[in-house]
């Protein structure tokens, strides 16, 4: 086995370990790992991506399984279903006030804190490598990749205007750090893109 193969296996094992370690943190909540994944998705997804089918693609699961997870979170009062403004036959799922509050106990918060302790150059390297890795994994598995505007080939930025060529519309500043079901991995125009963080859960 080549040294390169060993390195890639170690990287994969470390990524799996980090995910398990973060999910295994006992925060005292009554949510399962799948439910936490759903909560994070609907907290970070833009308005066109907060649908059951988009979550099913993101979670790499069936529509039936995704619907069960969503139903359980609605029963707990953490998610609410609304008719989409542009098509009342389509539903959009949003975090309720209780849902936003429970996010403060997200098991991944400990991983976020650990990342914050890294040197700037290491955080930058992770920020560049992980979206690319997610895109490659999606290609290998033949699934939909999710990402944010700065890494998407549909995105362009000029002056005070952000534009998505996929939907043919300008983007609100709050959408720039959100997950999008229309994401297409490619050379987003990062050089002109200002720094935007995902919307905070208030």
Image (cartoon, helix red, strand yellow):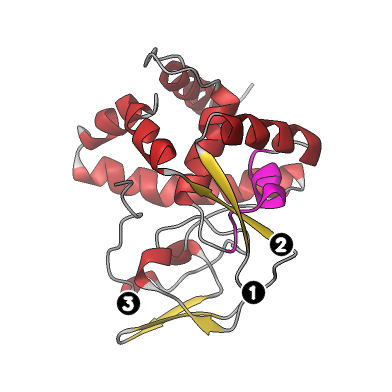
- Residue shown at 72%/31% (left/top)? 68
The image position of residue 122, as x and y in percent, is 28, 41
| Residue 9 visible at all | no
| Secondary element at tag 1 | loop
State yes or no: discs 2 and 3 in contact (Cβ < 8 Å): no
**Residue tagged by mark 2?**
90
In the rendered image of this protein, does residue 59 appear above or below residue 87? above
In magenta, the rendered stretch is 48-59
Which numbered disc, 2 or 3, marks the residue that appears first in the sequence?
A: 2
| Residue 16 visible at all | yes
Q: Residues within 10 Å of mark 2 (few under 14, many from 20)?
A: few
**Is 51 in the magenta?**
yes
The image position of residue 161, as x and y in percent, is 37, 84
- Check the picture and name the quadrant holding the N terminus: top right
Q: Residues within 10 Å of mark 3 (few under 14, many from 20)?
A: few
Q: Which mark is residue 86?
A: 1
- Residue shown at 35%/35% (left/top)? 101
State yes or no: discs 2 and 1 in contact (Cβ < 8 Å): yes
**Is 92 in the magenta?**
no
Q: Residue 176 lies in what quarter of the image?
A: bottom left
Q: CA distance from mark 2 to mark 1?
A: 8 Å
| Secondary element at tag 2 | loop
- Closer to the observer: label 3 or label 1? 1
Which numbered disc, 3 or 1, marks the residue that appears first in the sequence?
A: 1
| Secondary element at tag 3 | helix
Q: CA distance from mark 3 to mark 1?
A: 30 Å
State yes or no: discs 3 and 1 in contact (Cβ < 8 Å): no
**Residue tagged by mark 3?**
192
The image position of residue 165, as x and y in percent, is 58, 81
The image position of residue 20, as x and y in percent, is 49, 18
């Amino acid at each position: 086995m080549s040294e390169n193969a060993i390195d890639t296996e170690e990287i994969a094992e470390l990524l799996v370990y980090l995910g398990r370690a973060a999910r295994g943190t006992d925060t005292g909540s009554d949510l399962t790992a799948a439910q936490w994944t759903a909560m994070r998705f609907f907290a970070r997804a833009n308005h066109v991506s907060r649908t059951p089918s988009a979550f099913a693609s993101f979670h790499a699961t069936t529509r039936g399984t995704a619907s069960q997870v969503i139903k359980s979170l609605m029963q707990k009062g953490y998610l609410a279903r609304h008719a989409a403004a542009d098509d009342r036959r389509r539903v959009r799922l949003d975090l309720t006030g209780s849902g936003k509050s429970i996010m403060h106990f997200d098991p991944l918060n400990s991983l976020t804190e650990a990342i914050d302790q890294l040197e700037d150059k290491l955080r930058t390297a992770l920020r560049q490598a992980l979206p690319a890795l997610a895109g490659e994994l999606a290609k290998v598995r033949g699934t939909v990749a999710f990402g944010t505007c700065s890494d998407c080939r549909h995105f362009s930025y000029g002056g005070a205007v952000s534009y998505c060529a996929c939907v043919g519309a300008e983007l609100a500043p709050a959408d720039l750090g959100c997950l999008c079901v229309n994401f297409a991995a490619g050379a987003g125009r990062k050089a002109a893109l200002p720094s935007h963080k995902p919307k905070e859960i208030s």
